[in-house]
Structure formats: C-alpha cells, structure tokens
Amino acid sequence: MANEQHDRYTPGTVEAKWQARWENEGTNSFTLDRLRAPSDPFYNLMMFPYPSAEGLHVGNIYAFTGADVHGRWHRLQGRDVFEPIGFDAFGIHSENFALKVGTHPMDLIPRNVANFTRQLRRIGGMFDWNHTVDTTSPDYYRWTQWLFLQLFKGGLAERKEAPVNWCPSCMTVLANEQVVGGLCERCDTPVEQRRIAQWFFKISDFAPRLLENLAHIDWSETTKKAQENWIGRSEGALLRFPVLGVEATPELVRSATESPQTEGTGGSATDPGTATADASQEEGTRELLLEVFTTRPDTIFGASYMVLAPEHPLVDALTTPEQAPEVAAYRERVARMDLVARKKTDKSKTGAFTGGYCRNPATGERIPVWIADYVLMEYGTGAIMAVPGHDERDFEFATEFGLPIPRVVAAPDETADTPLAEAYTGPGHLVNSGDFDRLEVEEAKSRITAWLAEQGLAEARVNYRLHDWCISRQRYWGPPIPIVHCEACGPVPVPESELPVVLPRVEDFKPDDSGVSPLARVRSWYETECPECGTPARRETDVSDTFLDSAWYFLRYPSTDRGDVAFDPEITRTWLPVDAYIGGNEHAVLHLLYARFITMALHDLGHLDFEEPFARFRAHGMIIREGAKMSKSRGNVVVPDPIIEEFGADTFRLYLMFLGPFEEGGDYRDQGIQGPFGFLKRLWETIVPVEGLAEGDPDPDLERKLHQTIEQLTRQIPELGYNTSIAAMMEYLNAVRTGGRQARRSEVEPLVPLLAPFCPHIAEELWERLGHEGSIFEGANWPAFDPARLVEETVTLAVQVNGKVRGTVDLPVGTDEETALASARAEPNVARFLAEGELRRVIYVPDRLLNLVVA
RNA sequence: GCCGGGGUGGCGAAACGGUAGACGCAGGGGACUUAAAAUCCUCUGGCCUUCGGGCCGUGUGGGUUCGAAUCCCACCCCCGGCACCA
C-alpha cells in the first residue's frame, strides 16, 4: 500500500527530475565541436518570443509545443536536432510598456527575459540554452548594425523622405497603431503627416525574385498566398501624356520621371527605365510628358481626365494661378490627415482641379488634370489616367465632379451607346476607340500599348505593390543605425571595427519636442568625428526597426559561440537553410518576407550560399478559449503556470496538441484537460509497477493494433497531424486495458517512445523504469512497424441495398465477390430488402462494401 | 471588394468517393465508499419502434455517381489577412 502511494503519477516530481537531468547532462545542448560536425543535422526553428511583462502567453506555448514535438520526433529518428530559442526584446511594445510603468527598459527586459526563461524551461522544450539570442544585447545588435552596413555598402540602403504620422502636441512620430480614429492615442490631438528623411532598404528591387521563389519553397499555401498578395505584381503599361502649355525644362523632366516608384520597380525585365522620356525630348517634343501606370491601356480612349497625387512633384508646374489657392488648400487638407485616414476607402471622393491640361494621345483631346487623395504617391508613378467608364473609383470621382464618363468597352449584349450606370470592369470588346473598335479587351491591351510605344508614349511594364522597407524609427528602444552624418562627406558608415554603436542608457527616454529620436538630445553621445575626414560630425539618432532584429536571428543561433563574426561560414553551410520553421501566420508578410529579403541580399553580397532561409515553413492555427478570442481586456487569457502546477507540463502539452488540427488551431476548454490528464495517469498506472507487467508476446489483436498505431503516427507526426495521433494512442491504450486486463510489457513498452514527442518527461521516466539507460532522445528509439502485421484477418463488410446499409457481414480478408454475395443474401434484413425487386447490379469493393442495386 | 481557411451531435473534433460522428469533454445510469473525491463499468445525433429494425441527418439549393461530409456549379454565414494598388 505504501509502495502504491509512492508510485502514483506525480507530474511535478517527474518533470523537475528530468528537466534537471537534461540540464546537467547537456542532453539538448550542442558543443561547438558538435555544431561543426553533426552526423545528421536538422535545424528546427520556432519564432522567438517578445518577452512581455505578462509572461508566456498560451499562444506561444501552443506554437512552441507544436514545434518541439516536431523536433523531438526527428530526434527520435536519430537526427541531430538543433532547437534554439531567444528573445525579440527591442521595439515599441517594450518601450511603451516601460513608459507606462515608469521603469527603464534596460531594467525591465532582463526581468521579463528571466521570467520567460523560467517558463520556457518548465514546458519542457528541447531548447539549446547554450545558443540563445537576446536582440537587445550589444553582442547581438552589433551584428544587426553590421548587417545594416553590408546593405549600405551594397547600395541596398538609402535615405529619402517619407511621410510619417506626427502628433503636433506630443511632438513625436506615431506608429499607425498609435493613431486611433485620426487622433493621437495618448493626447487625442489630430494627427498629421510630416515628411522626414529616413532610411530605406530596397526590398522592392527584389520583388520579382521574392515572388518567383515562392514556387520552389515548401511553405504553407496560405503564407505563400499572403506574400504573393503583398508583393502584388500587376502587369500593364507605362503611358505618357503630353502636358499642354508646359515646357519641358530639365528639372521638370527629372521630377516627372524620377519618382520613387520608377526606381523602385527597376528590377523588372520589361522596364527600360526613363531613357525613352529623354529620347522623346530629343525628337523635339518640347512638351512635358506625364507618366502614368495602368493595367488597362485598352481603355485609354476613355481617359477623360488625369489625376495626380497631391504630393506629386509636377503639381506646381501644372497649376494655373487662378487655381493655385484651391490646390494649395486641398494639399494642406490632405497633409493634415493621418496616414490611416488617408487610405480609408469608404470616404467620398475629394479633389481639386489644377487648371492644367494634358492631351490624350489616343483621342487627341484636351483633358483636365486634377489632384485627389485617392491617388497615392507611393504606388505606380503617383499619377493616373482616369477612365471613369471602367474604373469604380474614377467613376465615383467623375460623378462627384461632373466629369464626362465615356464608354469604351462593351459587354456582348451592349453597344457603344449603352448608358453606364456604374463602371463596367468586365470583359468585352472596345467601342468608341477608333481603329481598335471590336477588339477584345485582352488583345487591345497589347495592341494599344504597341501602337503608343511606336510614338514613344508607352511601354509594357510590370509594377509591384511592395514598397521599400523603411527601417528608421524615431524612437529610443532599438539598435542605433550605425551612420555618422558629416557636413562634408555626407552619411558615412561607422567602421565595422567600431561596432557596436552602443545604445546609451538614457534615463529620460520619453519622446519630446525635439522632434526626433530621444537620442537626439544626448549630445555627448551623438557628437562624434567623421570616420572619413575627422571633422566634427553627428551620429544618426534614429534606431532601426525591430523587424530588422528578427530578420536574421536564425543565422546567429548556431554561431553564438563566435564573437568575431555574425555567423560562422562553415557552421552556416552545415545547418542552414532552416529545415523546419513553425510559427504564426500573423508574420506571413512582414517578418517572413524581411527574413527572405535579408537572406537574399546577403547571398548577393557574397555572405551566404543560399538565398531562401527556410526550406519548410508551417503556419500553426490560433487557439481561442471557450469559443471566444483570448485577450487581456476580456480577462479570459489562459495562465499557464497554475495549469502546469496542477496537471504538469506533459498534460498541458498533450492537451494543447489534442485541441484540434495544429495548423488550424482549437478551442481551449478548461474542463477538456481532464481527458489527456486521465490518459497519462492510466498509462502510468498500466506500466508503473514494472514488475507487475506480464511477459510474453502481445495479444495478436493488440499487436496488429499496435503496428497500425505506429504506422499512423509515423505518417502523421511529421505532417503535424497531432490531434489524431494522440487519439490513436488513446484508442490503443483503451484497447490494452479493456475489461481491466493486465497489460503485457510487449504491448505497452512501444507506446512510450510514441508518446515521447508530446510528453517528454513522463516518457523519460517510464523509459527509465522499463530498464533503459540514458535519455530516450539519445538514439533512434522510435519503434518500427511491420507492414505485414497491419493487415486484419477478418473484416466487417457493409452490405447496402440501393446505397443504404442494410446489414454487415464478417468475412475473411480477400473474400471474393461470389462468396460475399452469398453471405449477404443470408442476412435476413438484407434478404428482406432484396425481395422488393430484381437484382440489377452488384458493386463490390473488396473488404469494404457490397452494394446491391435492386429495381 | 479581393485573397486564404472554415461551417459535421450539447461542445472540441474524426472520417483514401464506400457502415458519418473515431478520440475526448460535458451529461445520464451503475459499481466501489459510512459519505464525498478519485477510480472503474455502461449509455449518449434526432424522431419512431412490435426492440427485428425504420425514417431523417454533415450551412442552403442544384448536379455528377451504384454510392457524396468528401467531387462540380450557384448561394448564405463565420474566422483570418489585404484593401482607393490605378
């Protein structure tokens, strides 16, 4: 009795014991030597957490457990699995929270990291604690800065002006999410736009490759689709509209053609760039040309006016003196809007007439030029030809301002004169389009583009939605951008030998009226000498985006033993690209795209020999609680510590993985944990007085079921089919225990490694009690199955009459049709339905079903 | 509006085009117990039943098929992402 007491399943004891042992024996840690020479490396990555003050969120635990199961499974196959974890602790979240509680982030973050570390150890992940990263450590961000310098030297970083949200009361830059309904979230002042010089990475140069490579990487389809949409390739044409009455001075031609977008899409193969514009100059066309991008060159005959973005550089040149006050007022009004409100689609169209005109090169007609905020400076050329008959936005605008709405496309049942009640954007043939009438839309696109190209007024063009990555943050809590501004030399990179540029401890890190980063008021820090000419110079005071920290962390993990390089070339070649990356789809377009870009850039710069960082990526689902989304404000967040306290980490892990398909998520119901808990208890009690297990071969039926279970798990676990794998183990254990029978060792022992990926602690304990030396994860301990033993001897055949099941018959496997039919006829209920008519047809699916068609 | 992913018992969910609801939760009944907890056994989609079984049932409406939760067409609803992108 006392012994029984002693042997009860107490998760706390078991888990503490094994966590300590893994730690002491370095079960999950790699030495530098082993990293250099693994026998079968497998890099298992999960998205490192942001260490918040609240502690590890159950969503993190869900993700990490799913990834850990995957890593442990590979380990049980005998592979060398490297499974690192770290902390993504820079950024506006930490900074805002620090501001709120009045603690310096340099004090706050270490506390949070310590708490996260404790929690992460407690859930039993197979983490290599000797290879962690903390993005806020100078040892790490030194290399983040190094990365910036590589891109800068490679011509992939540039400084240019861009709009930011500006709160005139707090005198600070706001992120989009800090703007609530056009007001500053802190002081409710209306937010406006301000243009400031910022650093950009030229990710848009990589748009075509980032898109094309998606076809060759093994990623969740949903993630790839999200990236595809984000990159937003669209095929169309660049068209040039002569501006009437404005002479083409060199400056105007420059501003007309050097819009950021024309550069941004420079990577596209169909883009000969701005040369044609110059050529047309040489032909003596003294007219200024206005460039627009369109996906519908076929509708050019319907372009009844033009629209420039209010910020477009040619607005001043086009505006007549009479219209100048109205234009200026409109531009000011737009500038006062925050960036979110600016792009709202549900507001009505506004705009102002510039007084200027273009000539429609197709019709020869004079068409007015307007400015309107529905045209965005950051897309295409920042100007459009407006075709109100066949574009919903233009239609709305033209209706608002009483502009003509010609029809140039007709559906099969329409004519050139069918009135347009709304923009028609469907297929059809051209009308009112001169020689191009009757052509189908698709053909007209290329024909019209070619026709205009002959006159130097068009070229085919591929445009991308993806815009350059602004990495400047006018904030405190991030790595300082390693640049020195010198009056004479311009922006000069900090020499690599002087890295890191250490973020100074600034007690007052609140944004203030200086208008830039808090670092801009630490004179002792920003005053320096130009690394090139030695004259007094000023450090860049902006810090870099948190997404830069996380765009390369997976490169650092295996090389954290190396203080002298960002990543060791040999080790990197050995371990990367990452074999399996599991994470949330909320990072589908930012983190995952930036990481791909950085990898591609480092590849081109000669630092890496691969250009895609993650060979395989799987997005996990989201978990909700009792049917509702979890959030702090609802107060329905699952707090992991008490649950682990009561049931143990193994049960918690098992339950999380049991909730539903890992890639779809699940509903956390507090009561539900009883199921997995009971399962572990029963498993323990089935095995634990090991002396109580019977010897001998397994029961034949159980043996078959065991092999089926092993087969199923071997197939499903690597595909993240966790919930059904767990169900299969439960089913098997139920079968072993039916009728309270005494289990044989041979029946239950293989269940231990099957369970190990999910519940590593109890698996280790049972494995040890069963007499094995060392950790179950050291060695290829996953059981094999024998395909020959999967097969049943008898099957239950469903017998249908006219597609409805009327009975079943038990038959030996492989019974022929004739015999099966005879047995079926012998079933009284089947015979009854058979008697209702004449047997017309027999469908026999051996070992499954017999369908008798009667009429 | 566009792009994904989904709609199956009271609930979470299973189901190579072949017996819908495995596994688990919750619930009913029973055993053990002085009692409770724990544990174990057992039942549990709905309606009807002469207890043999029958009818209905996977968001809705059509279609293909001997046979559809599964494939095709149209539509409705929910979740996630993007969105004045020319």
Image: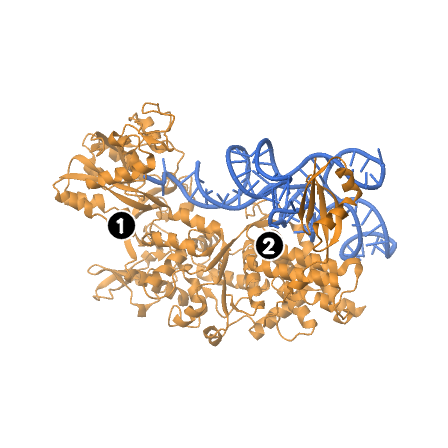
Chain colours: A orange, B blue
Amino acid carrying label 1: it is Glu
Does the image show residue A282? yes
Residue A322, placed above or below residue A278:
above
In this view, the residue in front, A854 or A33, is A854
Tell me the crowding category of disc 1: few under 14, some 14 to 19, or many 20 or more residues within 10 angstroms, Cα based.
Answer: some
Side (left or right) of A752 relative to A530 = right
Who's the residue at 69% across and 67% down the image? A749
Amino acid carrying label 2: it is Val
Tell me the crowding category of disc 2: few under 14, some 14 to 19, or many 20 or more residues within 10 angstroms, Cα based.
Answer: few
> Where does residue A619 sit, x and y in percent of width and height?
50, 53
Helix, strand or loop at label 2? It is: loop
Helix, strand or loop at label 1? It is: helix
Judged by depth in the image, the label closer to the viewer, 2 or 1, is 1
> Where does residue A100 sit, x and y in percent of width and height?
46, 52
> Any mark on residue A761, and which?
none
Which residue, given by chain and number where applicable, does mark 1 sit on? A263
Does the image show residue A296? no
Task: Establish whether labels 2 and 1 are both on one chain.
Answer: yes
Residue A824, placed above or below residue A600:
above
> Where does residue A256 sit, x and y in percent of width and height?
21, 43
Who's the residue at 17% across and 46% down the image? A278
Side (left or right) of A791 relative to A408 = right
> Any mark on residue A639, and which?
2
- Residue that lies at the very extreme toward the left in this rendered image: A284
Subunit ID for the residue under disc 2: A
